[in-house]
Structures are given as C-alpha cells and as structure tokens.
Image: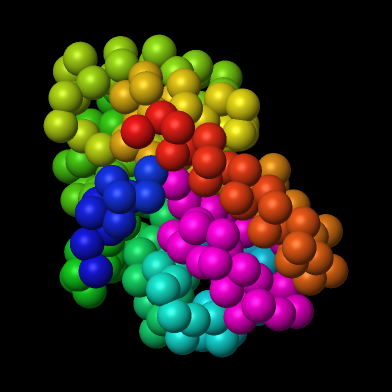
Amino acid sequence: MDLLAELTARRALCIIRAPAIPDPVGLAGTLVDAGLPIVEFALTTPDAPRLIERASGVDGLVLGAGTVMSAADARDAINAGARFLLTPGLRPEVAAEAVRQRVPVVLGAMTPTEVAAAVDLGATAVKVFPAARLGPAYFGDLHGPYPNVPLVATGGVTTDNAAEFLAGGALAVTAGSGVVGPALAAESRFDEVAERARGFVAAVGGAR
C-alpha cells in the first residue's frame, strides 16, 4: 500500500478516538461510503487492536493505527491488520519497527528540528501538530528548508479551514472529533458521521 499515493489522492484521513467503538465495521464502512476511506483507530481506545482486526476487512478501507507509542504497540497494530502507523511525536522505536516491517509510518513533529529528525528516522510523512495553533502559513514556512517532505496537518482542522492548510502546503489534513466525535462512535450514530464526513470531503475537494 502506497500511503503517500493514497493521501495525495484523498487529501484527508480520519482520526477516531472514542471511549468505545461497538461497531467498528459499520463505522469504517460509513466513512468509506462518505468518501473518507483513510482511517486511523487510536490505540487510546480500549481494545483497539481487536477493533482494527474486526474492521480490517471492510472493502475500500485504508486502515491504520494512531497514538502508537512503542515497538510493542506497533507490532500489535500491524498484527491486527493496520496498514500504516501514526505517532503523536518522535518515537524512534516505533519508526524502527515500522521500517523493519515495511509499514508506512507518520511521525508527529512541530518544530523544524523535529521534522528533520522524523525524516531521519524514516517517516513516510510528518504529522504537524497542533496545526490550528501554528496556522496554515507555517506549512509553507516548513517547505522552505524541507520542500519535499510530505506534511499532514493535525489538530483543530475543520471543514471551515481544511482548504487553507492544503493551500498552505499540507499534503493532507486530518478529520478528528468534528467528524467522528467520541459520542457518535460510541453510540453508532452513523447517519451523523456520514453527514459530517461528506462535508469534510467536500471542503477538502474544493482545495484541489
């Protein structure tokens, strides 16, 4: 799976972080049908590897694991069916395991020094957080010294500002609780998820 090609085509991925996800298959299928098929299940959700395993067979889904903090987390997620990994910051052990298993990894960073470190560790792309506080122009600033580093804007990205981050230089943006809020996932309120996801996809599509 070529994660960069997927992100280039879709320009968005969805982060799911909830106290419970009783129907991961239904939730994942809803997002695929809404045009948001690149999905991350955060390992902070209870029993996340099992949720990944259950959802991994959904047609059209590109499923990954987020908040991966250790090599053991990485192995558990990959064994469960995760096709890519994301970290909240620089996690050398996670990067090494991902590289060893040839699984794409998106490492978290904020500063130019951290972006360089992420690249040195073998990151497929770099997740810049908190994007909303840094602003869309920050991505253009980072591309000065790092013109070829794929950047993913995370944190505070909404339907109202997603296009600005893409125009500013982000390869892709993340849809978070504004699309799949914790309560929506825990209560399987898929109609609301679908409506929000379609709105986010429309916002991202308008930036292409």
Residue drawn where x is 54% and y is 81% of the image: 55
Q: Measuring from the top left, give residue 65's x and y in whole percent.
A: 47, 65
Rendered location of residue 123, percent (x, y): 25, 49
Residue 161 colored in magenta in the image: no
The quadrant of the picture occupied by the N terminus is bottom left
Q: Is residue 119 depicted above or below 160 in this figure?
A: below
Q: Residue at x 25, y 51 (%)?
A: 4
Q: Is residue 108 visible?
A: no
Foreground of the two, 188 or 149: 188
Which residue is rendered at x = 57% and y = 74% of the image?
29
Q: Is residue 112 left or right of residue 207?
A: left
The residue shown at (58%, 42%) is: 200
Is residue 105 found left or right of 87 in the rendered image?
left
Residue 175 showing in the rendered view: yes
Q: Which residues are magenta?
A: 12-38
Q: Hey, which quadrant is residue 119 in on the image?
A: top left
In the rendered image, the vertical position of residue 68 relative to residue 197, given as above or below: below
